[in-house]
Amino acid sequence: MRNPSRHQTLHNAVLSALLIALATGALSGCSATPAPAPSATPKPVPDAMAAPTDTTPVFASNDEALATATEAYAAYASFSDDVMTHKTSPDNLTALSTSVSRSYLPQVVAGLANFTTAGHLGEGASTFDSIALIRYTDAGDGHAEVEVYMCSDVSGLRLFDASGIDVTPSDRLTRIPLQVTFVSSDSNSSHLLVDKENVWSGRNFC
């Protein structure tokens, strides 16, 4: 299986996979420094808390942080699927802001809007699996940051043009290795929001 280009900003894994053969193939770049390459099957980090701070940890354990991140990404992926299948509007900022951070929101809105204005229609749903914790840290203000590896699977999604013809690329990458960062919501430190999505640039662990 071929590897994605080096650490590209995803905007949305589903959109990228479906449009890879229809668009220019270039997503906007990300300046983040790559983390150490995961093993073929990434393992969760040991159950040890971050360095002590003056505040009570947001999550009681790494397992709790990972579970919360998993729920947060599921909500975000569900919203993206609904936009692709025209069940909801891409500019529904109220719904998006419950899943995406303020800094990442403009990129997500732009990516979803580009998909709908192009006249494309998705059918089906995406899934994700093999989620593993990279790190969980608590900021001094009581907010948390959680970073994970995961595999996004878009094999269950098809792409149709405005006339109803199936234009799903036959050579699309259906399982995408991701590195995703979550941050706490301003109003609720235990509510995580998607803050960054990067296609993993190292060995494909999916």
Image (cartoon, rainbow, N blue to C red):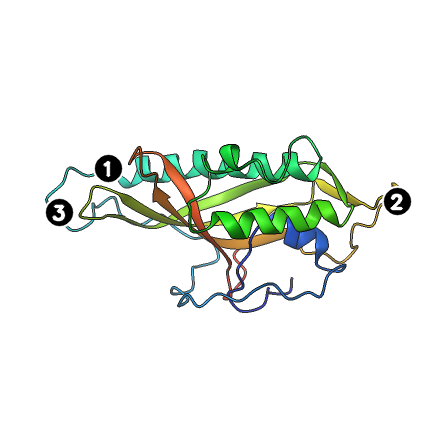
Labelled pair 1, 3 in contact (Cβ < 8 Å): no
Q: Position of residue 97 (x, y in %)?
A: 46, 38
Q: Mark 2 is on which residue type?
A: Ile
Element marked by disc 2: loop
Q: Earlier in the sequence, mark 3 or mark 2?
A: 3
Q: CA distance from mark 3 to mark 2?
A: 56 Å
Q: Is residue 61 left or right of residue 197?
A: left
* Residue positioned 79% across, 50% down in the render: 168
Give the class, few, some or many, for how many residues have Cα within 10 Å of label 1's Cα (few <14, many ≥20).
many
Q: Mark 3 is on which residue type?
A: Thr
Q: Nearer the viewer, residue 164 or 105?
A: 105
Residue 172 seen from this side: yes
Residue 206 seen from this side: no
Q: Position of residue 103 (x, y in %)?
A: 42, 51
* Residue positioned 54% across, 64% down in the render: 8
Q: CA distance from mark 1 to mark 2?
A: 48 Å
Element marked by disc 1: loop
Q: Which residue is mark 3?
A: 53
Labelled pair 3, 2 in contact (Cβ < 8 Å): no
* Residue positioned 52% across, 60% down in the render: 9
Q: Which residue is mark 2?
A: 165
* Residue positioned 48% across, 57% down in the render: 40
Q: Is residue 105 left or right of residue 15?
A: left
Q: Mark 1 is on which residue type?
A: Val
Identify the image quadrant of the N terminus. Answer: bottom right
Q: CA distance from mark 1 to mark 3?
A: 11 Å
Q: Which residue is mark 1?
A: 58
Q: Is residue 195 left or right of residue 117?
A: left
Give the class, few, some or many, for how many residues have Cα within 10 Å of label 3's Cα (few <14, many ≥20).
few
Element marked by disc 3: loop
